[in-house]
Image: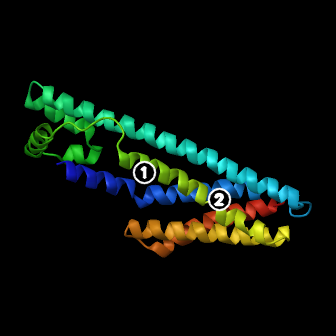
Amino acid sequence: MSNSADMAQRKRVLDPVERISEVIFGVLMALSFTGALSVATAGREEVRTMMLTALGCNLAWGLTDAVMYLVGTVVERSRKVALLRQLVEATSGEEAHRLIREALPERLSAAAEPAALEVLRQRLTAAALPRPGLVRDDWAAALEVFGLVVFATFPVVIPFVFVHESAIALRISNALAVATLFAGGYILGRYAESSPWRFGLAMAAVGTVLVAVIIALGG
């Protein structure tokens, strides 16, 4: 049972939707800082300040996301433990079935027959109660969340390190940001077993519109 729980936890930690969402969030956060840079007047000191600010902001948000991930994990796991305890202490099968129905998504709850609910009740009450606290994989996942948000800063700010012409660096930065968003959408499309190109292009379109607004505002 413990091996199955470990495998389920590892699968959740490696959820590509969570990974790509963190990368996209980090890219958009970094874009908000590069967009505030005026290429007409920006000197190397302004560019350096922008890069440090973007990195510092994503460090702060990455840390915040990681902490909130851990908080959410503890809350959700404690909720599941509480449900299992209620099932064990239920005085009747009807009460246990009601608890299971309330925990299921609405459509599944409506479709579940009493026999299926009873099978679930027996399996759940026979299992050992999981620990409500954090495990090693949770800390690894939080570190991954932090790393992804911070990593997403680099494609956006790296051009300013190697290209001294601010206008050219900004255009390269915007192109890399849109390419990163396209890649994120493409991966999400594959995960959803839908059209990855459609997802990728839709995500890139969102990035392109954002970049266009940034340029129109003087970036």
Q: Is disc 1 placed on a helix, strand or loop?
A: helix
Res. 34 image quadrant: bottom right
Residue 126 to residue 142: above or below: above
State the residue at coordinates (61%, 68%). Answer: 205
Q: Is disc 2 placed on a helix, strand or loop?
A: loop
Task: In this rendered view, identify the residue nearer to me: 98 or 91.
Answer: 91
Instruction: Point out the image quarter for the C terminus.
Output: bottom right
Pinpoint residue 149: horizontal percent, then vertical percent: 57, 54
Residue at the farthest bottom position: 197
Task: In this rendered view, identify the residue nearer to me: 121 or 151.
Answer: 151
Give the tally of numbered discs: 2
For disc 2, the marked residue is: 153
Residue 144 to residue 189: above or below: above
Q: Going by the image, does 38 lie left or right of 180?
A: right
Q: Residues within 10 Å of mark 1 (few under 14, many from 20)?
A: some
Residue at the farthest right position: 41
What amino acid type should be assigned to the residue bearing mark 2?
A: Thr
Circle nearer the N terminus (2, 1):
1
Res. 36 image quadrant: bottom right
What label does residue 140 carry, if any?
A: 1
State the residue at coordinates (33%, 55%). Answer: 10
State the residue at coordinates (64%, 50%). Answer: 58
Residue 132 to residue 152: above or below: above
What label does residue 63 carry, if any?
A: none
What amino acid type should be assigned to the residue bearing mark 1?
A: Ala
Pinpoint residue 128: horizontal percent, then vertical percent: 16, 38
Pinpoint residue 32: horizontal percent, then vertical percent: 71, 54
State the residue at coordinates (46%, 43%). Answer: 69
Q: Going by the image, does 44 lie left or right of 32?
A: right
